[in-house]
Amino acid sequence: MHVSHVSSAGTLLKVLVALLILTIITVAVSRVDFGGANLFVAMFIAVIKLSLVMIWFMHLKHDTATNILFILSSFVFLSLLFLFTIADWSTRGDTDPTLTQRAPVTQGVYPSSLRSDH
Amino acid sequence: MSDAHSHATPTPTGFVPHNVAHHFKTWEQEFQAAKLGFWLFLATEVLLFGGLFAAYIYYHGAYPETFKVCGEMLSWKLGALNTSVLLLSSWTMAMGVRAAQLSKKTACFNWLIITVLCGGAFMVVKYFEYSAKIEHGTLPTAWFHPHGPEAEVLNALIANGGQPSMFFSIYFTMTGLHGVHVLGGMVVITWYAIGVARGRYHSGHYLPIDLVGLYWHIVDIIWIFLFPLLYLVP
C-alpha cells in the first residue's frame, strides 16, 4: 500500500545531476557582470534548484492539492515580506529630503561592556 | 487492541506492525493528517528563515559594497563543496525514503546513515570556516574586532561608511540557524535509522522517514539560497 508515489531511482539520480550542474552554473554566472541583474540571475537559478528539490525529492508532483497549497502559501506571504522590505529601503528619502542619507548603524550603539575591543 | 478502530497496517514479514492511532478512521487519514501537519511546520520554517532573508535584502541594499567585499572573505570553494555535499545528502535521503517505501531494510538503513555522514561532513567544513572567522575576529555586532589579514580592508570599509559587522552578523545568524537545523536533522535521522534496523519502517509504515526527509530537503533548499547570497554576493 502506498499513499505517496514511489520515485524511480533513475529520476532521483537525474535530479541530483541537474542540481550539481546548476551549482556549477551558479558559481560560473557569479563571475559574469550582468550589470544590476546579478542578484536576479542568481536567484533565478536558486529557484530552479528549489523547484527541482520540491517537485521530485519532496514528491510535490504527486502530493495532495491541500499540501501543495499550504507550502506555496508560505512563499506568497514571504514575497509580501520581501516586497515591503524592498519598497521601504528603495524609497527612503523620497518623501522627506532630510532622510536621503540612510541612518548609519555604528558600533557605538552597543554598550561598552559588550565590546571586545576596549 | 480491543478498540474497534485500532488496526495494524499491512506488514511485510520480518517487520514490526504499525497500529493506526485509535482516533483515526483509516490509515490514509492518519497518513494525510500527519503529512498536512508537517507541511504546515515546513511553511513556518520557510517564514522563520524568510525573516532573516528579509534582513539580508535590507542590508545588502543599504551596504552593497560592504557585502561584496565581505562575501569575498568567505571561501566560495568551501561553500560550493558544502552545497554539493548537502545536495548529495538530499539525494541519499530521497533514496532512503524510496527504500523504506519498498521495505528494503538494509538499503534504507545505509542510505540514512550516508545522509547523516554527509550532514557531518557539512558541519566539519562549517567548523573550519567558523574557526577562521573567530580567529580573525570577523564576528557579529559587538564581537566584531578584525585583526587578521582582512583587518585593513575591513577598517577601510568602516572609514568609508561601510558596515562589515552587519554582514558577519547576518552570515553567522543565517548559517548558524541553518547549522542547528542540520545537527537536529542528523540526530532525528540517526534515531530513525535505528528504527529501520529494528524493522519499524516498511511499505505499511514509512511515514516518519518520509517526514524527516521533507525536513532534510527544506534544510537543503535554504542552503541553496544561502550559498549564492553569502559566498558569491551578487
Image: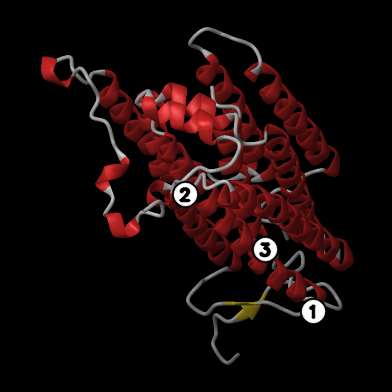
Query: Which element is circle 2 on?
Result: helix
- On screen, residue B161 versus residue B189, left or right, reads left
Looking at the image, which is closer to me, A2 or B114?
Answer: B114
Q: Is residue B53 visible?
A: no
- Please, which residue is most extreme toward the bottom here? B2
Q: Which residue is mark 2?
A: B173
- Residue type at tag 2: Thr
Residue drawn at x 77%, y 71% as measured from the top left: B196
- Please, which residue is most extreme toward the front here? A118
Q: Which residue is mark 1?
A: B198
- On screen, residue A17 versus residue B90, left or right, reads right
The quarter holding residue A11 reads: top right
Gap between marks 2 and 3, in whole Å? 20 Å
The quarter holding residue B195 reads: bottom right
Q: Chain of mark 1?
A: B
Neighbour tally class for label 3: few under 14, some 14-19, many 20 plus, Cα within 10 Å: many
Q: Quadrant of the C terminus of chain B?
A: top right
> Where in the figure is residue B20, as x and y percent of width and height?
59, 75
Neighbour tally class for label 2: few under 14, some 14-19, many 20 plus, Cα within 10 Å: some
- On screen, residue B217 versus residue B49, left or right, reads right
The structure's colour scheme is secondary structure
1 and 3 marks on the same chain = yes
Q: Which residue is mark 3?
A: B186
Q: Quadrant of the N terminus of chain B?
A: bottom right
